[in-house]
Image (cartoon, helix red, strand yellow):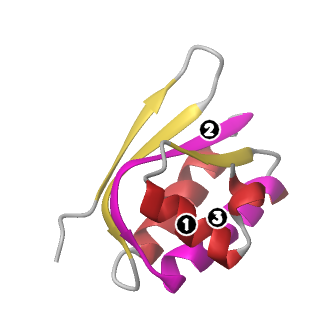
């Protein structure tokens, strides 16, 4: 089991950045979705970037969560994108058919 953490930073242009570390799977997906919804609801940023540089694993639950987070942010007027993807994460997003939606 990896240590899953999410930290937040802010860019000068109003963008919120969520820095995710560890595995995004059935045991951590709810925490990620909650973090996205909380940030978007509280701050209403124009853009929210999920930095996945240190994501070591992404399963189907994580893929569904990223898509749900994207939709939730969009409904509240925020553009959500993922950045800093490993080759593994890129491949997972492409196989699921959501790479172009999230990047």
Rate crowding at label 1 as few (under 14), some (14 to 19) or many (20 or more) other CA atoms within 10 Å. Answer: few
* Total residue callouts: 3
**Magenta span includes 52:** yes
Mark 2 secondary-structure assignment: helix
Nearest to the observer: residue 95 or residue 7: 95
> Residue 91 — which label?
1
Q: Nearer the viewer, mark 2 or mark 1?
A: 1
Query: Which of the labelled discs sits on residue 69, or is there none?
Result: 3
The nearer-to-camera label among 3 and 2 is 3
Mark closer to the chain start, 2 or 1: 2
Label 2 neighbour load within 10 Å: few <14, some 14-19, many 20+: few
Q: What residue is disc 2 on?
A: 43
Residue 16 versus residue 25 in the image, above or below? above
The CA span between labels 3 and 2 is 15 Å
- Asked whether the beta carbons under mark 2 and mark 1 sit within 8 Å of each other, the answer is no
**Above-or-below relation of 57 to 45:** below
Q: Residue at x 50, y 26 (%)?
A: 10
Residue ID at (62%, 29%)? 15
In this rendering, position of residue 10 left or right of residue 45: left
69 or 60, nearer to the observer: 60
Q: Is residue 16 above or below residue 14?
A: below
Write the start and end of the magenta stretch as one range. Answer: 46-74
Location of residue 49 with respect to 26 vertically, above or below? above
**Apparent side of residue 1 relative to residue 76 in the rendered image (left or right):** left
Image x and y of residue 38, in percent: 55, 55
Residue 99, position as x, y percentages in the image: 69, 60
């Amino acid at each position: 089991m990896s240590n899953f953490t999410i930290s937040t930073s802010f860019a000068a242009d109003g963008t919120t950045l969520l820095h995710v570390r560890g595995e995004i799977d059935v045991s951590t997906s709810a925490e990620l979705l909650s973090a996205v919804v909380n940030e978007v609801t509280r701050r209403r940023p124009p853009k929210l970037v999920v930095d996945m540089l240190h994501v070591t694993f992404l399963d189907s639950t994580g893929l569904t969560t990223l898509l749900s987070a994207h939709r939730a942010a969009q409904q509240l007027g925020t553009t959500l994108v993922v950045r800093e993807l490993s080759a593994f994460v890129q491949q997972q997003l492409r196989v699921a058919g959501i790479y172009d939606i999230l990047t």
